[in-house]
Amino acid sequence: MYPMSRPRRLRTTAAMRRLVAETTVRTHQLVLPVFVKQGAAAPVPIPSMPGVVQHTRDSLRKTAAEAVAVGLGGIMLFGVPATRDATGSGGIDPDGVLNTAVRDVHAEVGDDIVIMADTCLDEFTDHGHCGLLDAAGRVDNDATLAVYAQLALAQVRAGAHVVGLSGMMDGQVGVVRAALDAEGHHDAGILAYSAKYASALYGPFRDAVESQLCGDRLTYQQDPANAREALREAALDLAEGADIVMVKPAMSYLDVLHAVAEVSDVSVAAYQVSGEYSMVEAAVARGWLDRRRTVLETLTSIRRAGADLVLTYWAVQAAGWLR
Ligand code: PBG
């Protein structure tokens, strides 16, 4: 008896496979994360992220223009300051590395791409934590919120369309929304890193921003063991006014991404983080994986799980493949 049902019929030709593809990856759904280093005279390669650099002001402007030229949806800026202090004051300083970079990028590309800035303290603190520390050395949630509001205001004044709240402090979305509204920035959006896990996969990123962190972020980032908690985090962020909710990392958390996408009534993002990039690049360098096929497969999987937009260090290369 031959099979009656033949799913293979829908795989016979490239045209047939394209016709029935449920999931697509489009260039405008991709956001490129970039690093800019204060005082750099030339772009500095990041050894654990082959192909990614810490930009100079100049090379950042060129990269932003390229991102527009290839049709990316957004660019997410991270600053690497020359000096750090206990309160991360360089993040608020209008002439600090990140706010200067936001102004530069806005001058270069205006509204042609969505300009996002990382609204967090870890790049700017000498202890490397995402918040202020109390006398006992613990991250002080509520004292940190007031600083996040100042960070967000500085970034939006510099020209950011969206602030990316990546610090995992409770109440951060509500406090920042109120601060932005109080100054009339009703159109500035909030990308909430709602379900951000305490992941080993951020290792290369910490090289990229020259993180000073000793210890861990286990008291504020989520435990990889928990999925239900991600729904609670997302619900709080939605209630506080998040415009986009994000799950991070992406590939090891596709179940979480799917669950958040099921309940969210705003756009859902996923961050394909530094470690996801570095793992694939390391295998590609050894000839063990094919870069193009692997990257497009991971991006398709992330979209299939429910992400509307994806932050990925391969955004520019992917744009070339997706043309
Ligand atoms: C914190 C922040 C981190 C990343 C983005 N924002 C690092 C962390 O939480 O330690 C990681 C991104 C990546 O690994 O690509 N500001």
Image (spheres, rainbow, N blue to C red):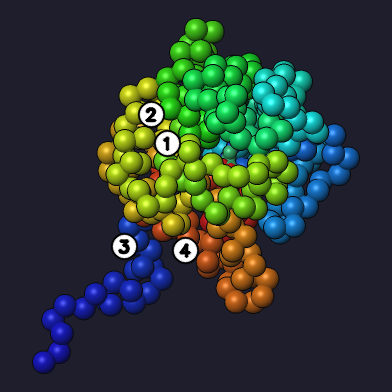
* The residue positioned farthest toward the bottom in the image shown: 1
For image coordinates 55% across by 54% down, the residue present is 201
Give the labeled residue for mark 3. Answer: 20
According to the image, label 4 marks what residue?
297
The label on residue 237 is 2
Q: Residue 95: which disc?
A: none
Q: Residue 10: image x %, image y %?
A: 29, 72
Which quadrant does ligand 1 occupy?
Answer: top right
Nearest to N terminus: mark 4 or mark 2? 2
Residue 73 visible:
yes
What amino acid does circle 3 point to? Val
Q: Quadrant of residue 215?
A: top right
The reply to whether dot 4 and dot 3 touch (C-beta < 8 Å) is no
Q: How far separated are the C-alphas under marks 3 and 2?
A: 35 Å
Q: Give SS at disc 2.
A: helix
Residue 6, percent from left and from top = 21, 78
